Image (spheres, rainbow, N blue to C red):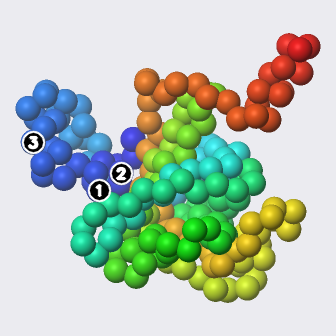
């Protein structure tokens, strides 16, 4: 866990529960240090580039959280630099909940899963939309059938690798085909 993630996630109520359940001492040191945003390293960038989906949470003006699955071709979530990621926002069901939520609160949370390897990366950031055609072209795979409406750009505040406990391995169809080929099936 990074210092910045602990600084943002460990609210007063969270710290009280840590104290009550005797984990506060081991986590308190993580909050020490400067309150500067985290920068992605090569492990995070590689993990992000390998994903073909992730979960994105935003919060509406009424305080209700909204969680949705985002998918696309492998690597559709791009690392632009050490503190910025972005993706083409493809046309979907036209509810525009995330985009509407970002108008009032730019804070988002992402969870990226690698089910076969039982790994997850959690990201806290601030998001905005962009209609920049050059950026949209950079983020769009011309072979993918989805139609992009905008780019969503996320400035990373913090990230955390989570333990693999309780992650059930799951495999996509291409991953199963590769396993079958390797096994000679």
Residue 83 image-quadrant placement = bottom right
Quarter of the image for the C terminus: give it: top right
Measure how far apart labels 2 and 1 are at the Cα level: 5 Å
Circle 1 — which element? helix
Mark 2 Cα shell of 10 Å, populated few (<14), some (14-19), many (≥20): many
The spot of residue 4 in percent (x, y) is 35, 54
Question: Is the Cβ of the residue at disc 3 closer than 8 Å to that at disc 2?
Answer: no
Which residue is the site of mark 3? Answer: 16
| In front: label 3 or label 2 | 3
Measure how far apart labels 3 and 2 are at the Cα level: 17 Å
Question: Is the Cβ of the residue at disc 2 closer than 8 Å to that at disc 1?
Answer: yes
| Observer-nearest of 67 and 54 | 67
Mark 3 Cα shell of 10 Å, populated few (<14), some (14-19), many (≥20): few
Residue at 58% x, 57% y: name it.
Answer: 70
The spot of residue 180 in percent (x, y) is 84, 20
Residue at 28% x, 51% y: name it.
Answer: 9
Which residue is the site of mark 1? Answer: 8
> Can residue 143 be seen by looking at this rendering?
yes
The spot of residue 7 in percent (x, y) is 27, 53
Image height of 164 relative to 83, above or below? above
Residue at 47% x, 39% y: name it.
Answer: 161
Circle 2 — which element? helix
| Observer-nearest of 99 and 17 | 99
Image height of 174 relative to 55, above or below? above
Which residue is the site of mark 2? Answer: 5
């Amino acid at each position: 866990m990074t210092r910045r993630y602990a600084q943002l996630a460990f609210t007063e109520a969270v710290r009280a529960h840590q104290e009550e359940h005797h984990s506060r001492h081991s986590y308190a040191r993580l909050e020490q240090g400067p309150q500067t945003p985290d920068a992605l390293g090569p492990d995070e960038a590689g993990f992000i580039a390998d994903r073909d989906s992730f979960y994105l949470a935003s919060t509406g003006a009424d305080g209700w959280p909204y969680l949705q699955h985002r998918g696309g071709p492998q690597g559709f979530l791009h690392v632009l630099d050490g503190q910025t990621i972005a993706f083409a926002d493809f046309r979907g069901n036209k509810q525009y909940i995330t985009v509407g939520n970002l108008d009032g609160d730019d804070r988002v949370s992402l969870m990226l899963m690698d089910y076969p390897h039982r790994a997850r990366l959690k990201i806290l950031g601030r998001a905005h939309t962009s209609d920049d055609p050059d950026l949209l072209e950079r983020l769009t795979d011309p072979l993918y059938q989805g139609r992009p409406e905008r780019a969503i750009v996320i400035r990373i505040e913090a990230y955390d690798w989570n333990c693999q406990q309780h992650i059930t391995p799951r495999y996509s169809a291409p991953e199963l085909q590769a396993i079958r080929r390797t096994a000679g099936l």
